[in-house]
Image (cartoon, coloured by chain):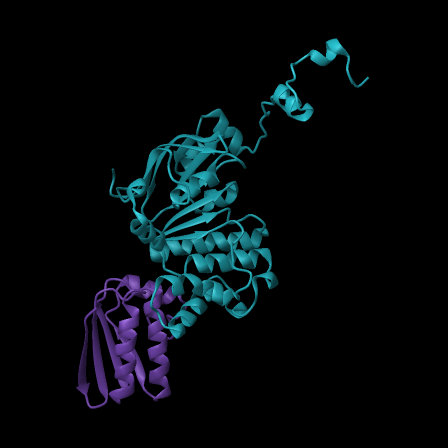
C-alpha cells in the first residue's frame, strides 16, 4: 500500500435493507488531496461515505486508514480515528437547542480539556473562517440553509481534523454561496494540507475542487482519475453522466404491479382476463 | 510539552516551546503562559516557536488570550521562529496582522 494514501478501500460490498448497494468498490484516497466521489442520486456514494467515517461496518471488503484495517479498530481505536476526522453532513446536523457557538464547542468540550475561554476563541475563529462570526449567538432555526451548512462546516473543523468529509456541500445553496464553500475547501487543502473527501453530484463543483474524481453508478465504481482523465474517458456511462443525460430506467413492471395489487402479477394477464382495463 | 522561561532583561522575557501546541497540550501551556504574564511583570514577552512542529487552532486561541493579557498590562507579545505550518494556521485564523506573521 502506498504511503501517500490516507485511506484505501478494497473489495467493499454493502447492503441496505437486504438490497446490495455497493459492489466490490476499490480505490485509494491520497494524503492532502481533494477526492470527489460523484454519481447520480442513489448511486451509493453516501453509503460509501458512511463506511469511510466508521458509521457502517464493512460486511465484506476492507477499509484501511494509513495502512491500518478499520475493521480491526477496537472502541479506543475508533474513538482515536473519529478525533482525526471532521464530517459535514448534508443537513449541517446542528443541535437545534444550542446556539451556533455552542454547537461548535460541543466536540471541543467532549474531546479536550481546554478552558471555556480557549474554546470560545476557537469557536469564534472557526465561525469567522466560514463567514459567520456575527452569528455566534443565533439559534440554528434563525439561519438560512447556506448558513446552517457553513456552521456545520465550522463544527466539522473545530478539532483541526486531518481528514474532512463533506456530504453534498452545494445542495440547497445558491450558486454564489456554493462557490464560496468550494473556495474554502481549496483553502483548507492549501493552507492546512487537509485530506478532503467530498461527496457530490454537482459536476461543475467537482471539476473545480477535485485532485481526484471517483465516479460511481448503481453501486459500482465506474472510473477513478484526475478531472482531465475523467473528462477524456471513453466509457459510455461516464460520458453520459458528464453530459448529464438521463438514462432509461429498467422498470420491473411485474414487481411494481404485484406490490400495487397485493398479489403476484404476471405480464399480459390483464389483456387475457380483461379485468379493470382502461379502454 | 516542555516550556522554558528566560528573563532576558529586567522587563523582557523569552519562552521557548518544544513540541506540538495543539488541543492536547494547550491547557498546560496556557496555564504556564498566563502565570508568566501575571507574575513576572515583563513588559515584553517573546515566544520562540522554532521547536514547535505543529500549531493548532487551540494554540492560536491561547496566543490570543496571552496577547490580550499582555496588552492589558501595556506590554507586547512577539512570536519568533514560526514555521510555515504555524504561519498558515495564524493566517487562516485571519490573525496574521495581529501577530505580524
Chain whose colour in the figure is purple? B
Q: Quadrant of the C terminus of chain B?
A: bottom left
Q: Residue at 41% of width from left, 58% of height from top?
A: A157
Q: Is residue A182 visible?
A: yes
Instruction: Estimate the x, y position of residue A268 in percent, counting from the top left.
Output: 68, 12
Q: Is residue B43 visible?
A: no
Q: Left or right of B14: which side holds B26?
A: right
Q: Left or right of A178: which side holds A163?
A: left
In this rendered view, identify the residue nearer to me: B92 or A73.
A73
Instruction: Estimate the x, y position of residue A211 in percent, counting from the top left.
Output: 39, 43
In this rendered view, identify the residue nearer to me: A21 or A168.
A21
Please determine whether, in this image, residue A234 is positioned above or below residue A141: above
Instruction: Estimate the x, y position of residue B21 in percent, counting from the top left.
Output: 27, 67
Please determine whether, in this image, residue A163 is positioned above or below residue A20: below
Instruction: Estimate the x, y position of residue A269 in percent, counting from the top left.
Output: 70, 12
Chain whose colour in the figure is cyan? A
Q: Quadrant of the N terminus of chain B?
A: bottom left
Q: Residue at 52% of width from left, 40% of height from top?
A: A201
Amino acid at each position: 500500500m502506498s504511503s501517500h494514501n490516507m485511506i484505501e478501500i478494497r473489495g467493499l460490498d454493502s447492503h441496505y435493507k437486504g438490497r446490495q448497494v455497493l459492489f466490490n468498490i476499490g480505490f485509494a484516497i491520497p494524503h492532502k488531496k481533494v477526492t470527489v466521489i460523484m454519481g447520480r442520486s442513489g448511486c451509493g456514494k453516501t453509503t460509501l461515505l458512511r463506511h469511510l467515517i466508521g458509521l457502517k461496518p464493512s460486511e465484506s471488503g476492507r477499509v484501511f486508514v494509513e495502512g491500518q484495517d478499520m475493521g480491526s479498530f477496537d472502541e479506543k481505536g475508533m474513538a482515536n480515528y473519529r478525533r482525526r476526522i471532521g464530517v459535514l453532513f448534508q443537513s449541517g446536523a446542528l443541535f437545534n437547542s444550542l446556539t451556533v457557538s455552542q454547537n461548535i464547542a460541543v466536540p471541543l468540550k467532549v474531546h479536550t480539556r481546554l478552558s471555556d475561554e480557549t474554546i470560545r476563541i476557537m469557536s469564534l475563529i472557526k465561525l469567522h473562517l466560514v463567514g459567520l462570526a456575527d452569528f455566534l449567538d443565533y439559534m440554528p432555526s434563525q439561519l438560512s440553509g447556506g448558513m446552517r451548512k457553513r456552521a456545520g462546516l465550522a463544527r466539522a473543523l473545530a478539532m483541526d481534523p486531518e481528514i474532512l468529509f463533506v456530504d453534498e456541500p452545494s445542495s440547497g445553496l445558491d450558486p454564489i454561496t456554493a462557490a464560496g464553500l468550494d473556495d474554502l475547501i481549496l483553502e483548507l487543502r492549501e493552507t492546512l494540507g487537509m485530506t478532503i473527501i467530498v461527496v457530490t453530484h454537482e459536476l461543475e463543483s467537482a471539476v473545480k475542487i477535485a485532485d481526484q474524481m471517483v465516479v460511481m453508478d448503481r453501486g459500482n465504481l465506474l472510473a477513478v482519475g484526475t478531472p482531465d482523465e475523467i473528462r477524456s474517458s471513453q466509457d459510455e456511462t461516464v460520458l453520459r453522466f458528464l453530459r448529464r443525460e438521463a438514462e432509461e430506467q429498467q422498470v420491473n413492471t411485474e414487481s411494481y404491479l404485484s406490490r400495487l395489487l397485493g398479489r403476484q402479477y404476471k405480464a399480459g394477464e390483464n389483456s387475457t382476463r380483461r379485468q379493470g382495463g382502461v379502454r | 510539552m516542555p516550556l522554558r522561561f528566560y528573563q532576558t532583561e529586567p522587563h523582557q522575557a523569552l519562552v521557548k516551546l518544544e513540541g506540538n501546541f495543539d488541543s492536547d497540550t494547550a491547557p498546560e501551556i496556557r496555564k504556564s503562559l498566563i502565570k508568566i504574564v501575571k507574575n513576572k511583570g515583563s513588559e515584553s514577552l517573546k515566544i520562540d516557536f522554532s521547536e514547535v512542529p505543529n500549531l493548532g487552532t487551540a494554540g492560536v486561541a491561547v496566543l490570543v488570550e496571552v496577547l490580550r493579557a499582555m496588552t492589558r498590562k501595556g506590554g507586547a507579545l512577539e512570536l519568533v521562529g514560526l514555521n510555515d505550518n504555524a504561519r498558515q494556521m495564524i493566517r487562516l485564523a485571519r490573525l496574521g496582522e495581529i501577530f505580524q506573521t
